[in-house]
Amino acid sequence: MPQLDEQIGAVFADRDILPGDVPQLDLYMDQVLSLFDRYLSAEKRDPSDKLLTKTMVHNYVKEGLMTPVRGKKYTRQQIMQLLCVYHLKQTLKLSDVKALTGRDDVDFEACYSKLLADKERIRAVVPPLVREHLPADPSDPNERLALCLALSAVAEYLRRLCESLIDAIPEQTGGAK
């Protein structure tokens, strides 16, 4: 199973933008896009993929997933909010992301820092679980499909848990939701 071990290792060796990587100064859109590309480009499935575009960010603001920019610069808090949106949109519908990030009662930097700590624990726990409980030979088409089905089922359970947590969010009064 060396091929599967290599694939697991590569997936769980992703790099994150650390809070210290985000400047204390407000950034123009091009600087925000450069920040994401510089630190997260390894997450691209294909080198030509775009992690984040101006249009995406404008749509996030327009749809209420993040606070509107004042002037032409994004604050550190908005960049942290955008990082949260970026991570959530990988698995959740935009309306669910909005329910979590389109709020004024969240400390996005604290939540993002907690995510990074949680990801460290996940990186230590999940690969051994996959190797032990879902062993497979990815060169065998049947085993590859069975493994992908099992991993997809785990992702579905976790997405549904997120949705259940989102559905339990109380309505916010006087602010954006």
Image: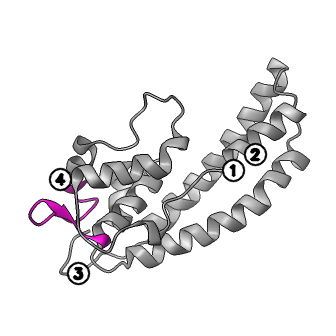
Labels 2, 3: front one? 2
Residue 92 in view of the camera: no
Magenta portion: prevailing SS class: loop
The CA distance from mark 2 to mark 3 is: 45 Å
Nearer to me, 125 or 103: 125
The crowd level at tag 3 (other Cα within 10 Å; few <14, some 14-19, many 20+) is: few
Which mark, by number, is residue 9? 2
- Residue range of the region highlighted in magenta in the rendering: 60-76
Residue located farthest toward the top when viewing the structure as drawn: 141
Describe residue 110's horizontal placement relative to residue 148 as left or right.
left
Dot 2: element = helix
**Residue that badge 1 annotates:** 12
- What amino acid type should be assigned to the residue bearing mark 4? Lys
Labels 4, 1: front one? 1
**Are dots 4 and 1 in contact, CB under 8 Å?**
no
Upstream in sequence: badge 3 or badge 1: 1
Which mark, by number, is residue 173? 3
Dot 3: element = loop
In the rendering, at what x and y percent does residue 120 appear?
Answer: 67, 66
Nearer to me, 153 or 64: 64
The CA distance from mark 3 to mark 4 is: 20 Å
**Are dots 3 and 4 in contact, CB under 8 Å?**
no
Nearer to me, 153 or 121: 121
| Residue 64 painted magenta | yes
**Residue that badge 4 annotates:** 62
